[in-house]
Amino acid sequence: MKPPPFQYHRPSTVEEALAVLDDAGHDGKVLAGGQSLVPLLNMRLAAPAHLVDVNRLAELAYVRTDAEAVRVGAVARHAEVEHDADAHGAVPLLRQALTDLAHPTIRNRGTVVGSLVHADPAGELPAVLALLGGTMELAAAGGRRTVPADGFFVGPLESALRPGELATEAVFPRPPARSGSAWREVARRHGDYALCGVGVLVTLDEDRRVAAARAACISVGPTPVVVDLAEAVGGRPHDAADWAAAGALAAARVDPEDDIHASAAYRRHLAGVLTARAGRAAAEQAAQQAQGEAR
Ligand SMILES: Cc1cc2nc3c(=O)[nH]c(=O)nc-3n(C[C@H](O)[C@H](O)[C@H](O)COP(=O)(O)OP(=O)(O)OC[C@H]3O[C@@H](n4cnc5c(N)ncnc54)[C@H](O)[C@@H]3O)c2cc1C
């Protein structure tokens, strides 16, 4: 099928883009990598009167790592973040999750910010942002605002972005010292959307005991489900924590539904198994990190 007719805009500055989006209001849509939007247009599941192509906004084509965070501009592709050594050093969870996101060709074109705005409950990046406690930078003709991840993902394919707004940047904070992370997912074929995926972030104290542990699970609820695992593993030595108990805790907290791809019971089971596996791997990485930092 072909998309319904629309007016195509290709601004070359953010200011120009915001003016077009402001004029278009509810009838406008941003076009970034097009990996989700173009199929929706072709299937006529979306019919915006104005498409605002942001790919020429050179000022938003960046991946920057500083002392606090990795900052990803709206035009940075998944692959650029995946292969950025500084970003990987600061927030390893980004590359850990991105290698499971779709296929390399899609990662060459799709954008990190586009994925976040798209807010697919099966998407990896909303869970990464939620787990790290990251934020989204949003701009409109009338001003700018910062929205934390826990207020940004409001439902399946629904974010807090308002008509006329452009998401300019996603901010992924560096985890604290002595932290480790891991991503585990199960999909029917590599590159497909996950039947369930889990990211875990573990932070150790100076005695290498678990000071904090959280999981973020995808494809088991309308938005990423963040579970505090401290009840199961908090205070335990990193190599003696009961990750099976952490998995059971996560499985009890998610609320998946049956669909054509998998039963709710199977997804719940996966949430438990993947949390346990990711937790163990994250704790191991945190211990290595602690050893490196102590040298
Ligand atoms: C075969 C296939 C497999 C895939 N598998 C996965 C997967 O496993 N995991 C996964 O997470 N994704 C997957 N995707 C989706 C892919 O990651 C997309 O890149 C991503 O969902 C959207 O990014 P985009 O830049 O292509 O956004 P677009 O498709 O251009 O836009 C998506 C939505 O976000 C809005 N938007 C985009 N950028 C902005 C912005 N800066 N400001 C405001 N609104 C904006 C658009 O208006 C639109 O509503 C898959 C896609 C395909 C085709």
Image (spheres, rainbow, N blue to C red):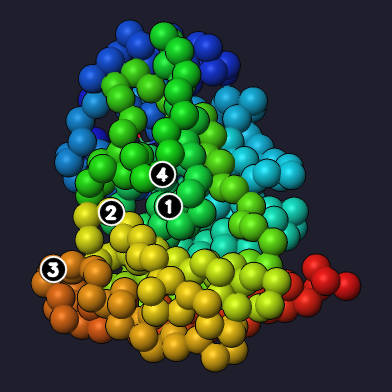
The residue nearer to you, when weighing 157 against 10, is 157
Above or below, comparing residue 183 to residue 140 in the picture: below
Query: Is the residue at mark 2 in contact range of ligand 1, meaning its CB lies under 8 Å from it?
Result: no
| Residue 257 - label | 3
Are dots 2 and 3 in contact, CB under 8 Å? no
Q: Name the residue under label 4.
A: 149
At horizontal 39% and vertical 65% (from top left) the residue drawn is 228
Query: Is the residue at mark 3 in contact range of ligand 1, meaning its CB lies under 8 Å from it?
Result: no
Few, some or many residues within 10 Å of mark 4 (<14, 14–19, 20+)? many
Q: Callout 3: helix, strand or loop?
A: loop
At horizontal 35% and vertical 81% (from top left) the residue drawn is 247
Few, some or many residues within 10 Å of mark 2 (<14, 14–19, 20+)? many
Three-letter code, disc 4: Ala
Give the Cα distance between marks 4 and 2: 11 Å
Q: Mark 1 points at which residue?
A: 130
Q: Which of marks 1 and 3 is nearer the N terminus?
A: 1
**Corner quadrant of residue 14:** top right
**Corner quadrant of residue 204:** bottom right
**Mark nearer the viewer, 1 or 3:** 1
